[in-house]
Image (cartoon, rainbow, N blue to C red):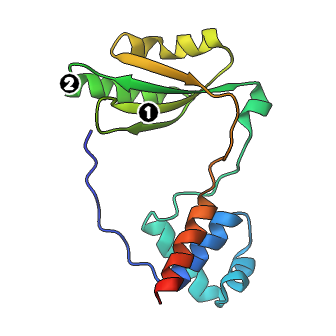
Amino acid sequence: MVKIAKAKPKLDAIDLRILAAVAEQGRQTLTELSKAVNLSASPCTARLEKLETDRVILGYHADVDVEQLAHLSLYYASISVEPHSAQTALKIEELLKASPYVVTADALFGKRDYLVRIYARSTQHYYEIMAPFAALADTETWPISFNIVRPQTDRLVKELKRHQEDRL
């Protein structure tokens, strides 16, 4: 499925300060956020709501170590559809969305069509999760031995904020 790019909202230095503060600590009161970005509560709340409405902020999430919680292992898999067909792509995307063990799935350009992160209880469980995909496409798997950098968008948001401040 082709995703059409939408116009990016205009963000200023205050918006980036809010994003950096929320990315670093999503669980804070509006009063704490207002103080952190040096803005009074009402304008800070309005800007935060606009960032949510514009879908710059997609949600507030806990960083849960699911491997420790449920003794799961992480696998990366690529899925390649050859010959490519829109019908097969839609079926694969439906399967990806339906599986609770698929935690991310991205469409790619090039030879591989999808890159997927999957948690499974065992190798056998992983193969059970992948069976519907293997019937439709070629797959390749990379079991992960350990995480070096966990998803940390707060670091990237801080860098973008710093980059904009340097330009001013």
Label 1 crowd (10 A; few <14 / some 14-19 / many >=20): some
Between 5 and 73, the one nearer to me in the picture = 73
- The residue shown at (53%, 84%) is 165
User: Is residue 50 at least partly visible in the picture?
Assistant: yes
Q: In this view, does 74 lie to the left or right of 165?
A: right
Q: Gap in Å between the C-alphas at discs 1 and 2?
A: 17 Å
Q: How many labels does the image show?
A: 2
- The residue shown at (20%, 24%) is 85
* Image location (x, y in percent) of residue 97: 45, 32
Q: Quadrant of residue 117?
A: top right
User: Is residue 48 at least partly visible in the picture?
Assistant: no
Q: Is residue 13 left or right of residue 21?
A: left
Label 2 crowd (10 A; few <14 / some 14-19 / many >=20): few
Q: What residue type is labelled 1?
A: Leu
Between 12 and 110, the one nearer to me in the picture = 110
* Callout 1: SS: strand
* Image location (x, y in percent) of residue 61: 65, 52
Labelled pair 1, 2 in contact (Cβ < 8 Å): no
Q: Earlier in the sequence, mark 1 or mark 2?
A: 2
| Residue under numbered circle 1 | 115
* Callout 2: SS: loop
| Residue under numbered circle 2 | 85
Indicate which disc residue 74 carries: none
Q: In this view, does 138 lie to the left or right of 29?
A: left
Q: Quadrant of residue 135?
A: top left
* Image location (x, y in percent) of residue 34: 68, 83
Eye-nearest disc, 1 or 2: 1
* Image location (x, y in percent) of residue 38: 67, 89
Above or below residue 24? Residue 85 is above
Q: Which amino acid does label 2 sit on?
A: Ser
